[in-house]
Amino acid sequence: MFVLAIESSCDETAAALVEDGTTVHGAVVASQVDLHAKYGGIVPEVASREHLRAIVPVIREAFADAGCGLEDIDAVCATRGPGLAGALMVGYSAGKAIAFGRDLPFLGVNHLEGHVYANWLVEGPAPVFPALCLVVSGGHTDLILMHGHGSYERLGGTLDDAAGEAFDKSGRLLGLPFPGGPEIAKLAATAGPSSLRLPRAWLRGTRDFSFSGLKTAVLHAVRDEAALPAEIAWEFQEAVVDVLAGKVSRIARELGVAEVLVAGGVAANTRLREELQERCSVPVRIPPPSLCTDNAAMIGAAGGQRLALGQRSPLDEDIFSTNDWTRV
Ligand code: KG4
Ligand code: ZN
């Protein structure tokens, strides 16, 4: 099945052509990051307008990249949520319009399920169940036990800030451009361990996370000039990575899962990738960085699996944001 997939949940307008949920034939991601940088974060209305401007050229470019046209696709899918409502609506409406115009099946895909399915786009044998999924994005930090395709059990998640949100807010405290995640990683790479020690919220006995205390500790460290900015960035990153890799490796062992699947923008972080590989006793899969951050290929991967099971979304259905993506 040859699917056109569209993603527009936040500040990336993306389209991809994906075959059977596993093979990418063409993929385009138009980032608005420069547009939002001067505001220090994403401005929803600016994002919606930019999606409107970009959506048709991005879809056209994805087809050109794949060397095919509308007549070659079997279905359309688009991100249905969670995300910014006005931003989601642009991609979702474009997807529905194409499906309606060509009389094709249409499916709305959950953005976070899409992140997890980026792991099916990597060459080689498919992931094995049961798998422990760590989803670390700008808005979510979820720990999910995946029993099979579309079968999820939520084990825990953040009680306050998402890991990416903590990176972004700490980046802002350090005076770094938005988004803070890659900027903190870059700055940290210029430093090394120092005597500065930031707190780790282990929340022992739970499968949950908390990053807001760490963010406050960064605020104090910056105000008190407790260390050089690069050393604060280093220790902040180590604190996030320590808790994520420490808890995931322990829970993977406790549950006896076959694999660990990592997903979302923060999974692009080199230190997190290194520590998860180092500490987990089962195979750890992490997509290449370009498939960790928002893209449409992952939506085509998740959508492809569901379309193959016969699932469809009615064209009179609208976007839908839910935080409990394990029940969609
Ligand atoms: O998944 P994503 O692209 O968008 C959402 O669904 O939220 O994730 C974006 C998040 C941002 O918070 C960004 O700072 C973070 O991923 N991020 C990183 C890195 N690259 C992106 N965080 C740490 N290290 C990175 N290299
Ligand atoms: Zn995302």
Image (cartoon, helix red, strand yellow):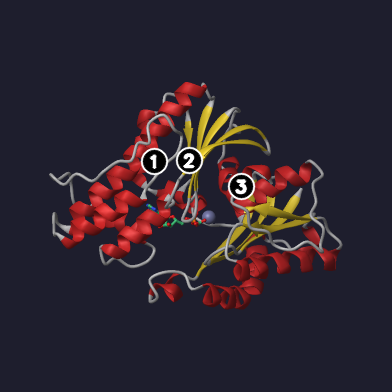
Image quarter for ligand 1 equals bottom left
In this figure, what is the number of numbered marks? 3
Viewer-nearest residue: 6 or 79 = 79
Q: Is residue 67 left or right of residue 182?
A: right
Residue furthest to the right in view is 103
Vertical comparison of 175 with 156: above or below: below
Question: Mark 2 to mark 1: distance in Å?
Answer: 7 Å
Which residue lies under the disc numbered 2? 286
**Amino acid of disc 2:** Ile
Q: Relative to residue 112, is residue 186 drawn left or right?
A: left
Going from N to C along the chain, the mark reached first, 3 or 1, is 1
* Mark 2, secondary structure of its residue: loop
Which residue is rendered at x = 58% and y = 61% of the image? 83
Q: Mark 2 and mark 1 in contact? Answer it, CB < 8 Å.
A: yes
Question: Label 1's element?
Answer: helix
Residue 8 in percent (x, y) is at 60, 64
Question: In terms of secondary structure, where does tag 3 sit?
Answer: loop
Q: Nearer the viewer, mark 3 or mark 1?
A: 3
Mark nearer the N terminus (2 vs 1):
1
Which residue is identified by label 1?
A: 273
Q: What's under tag 3, amino acid-wise?
A: Asp
Q: Which mark is residue 66?
A: none
Q: Quadrant of residue 6?
A: bottom right
State the residue position of label 3.
Answer: 324
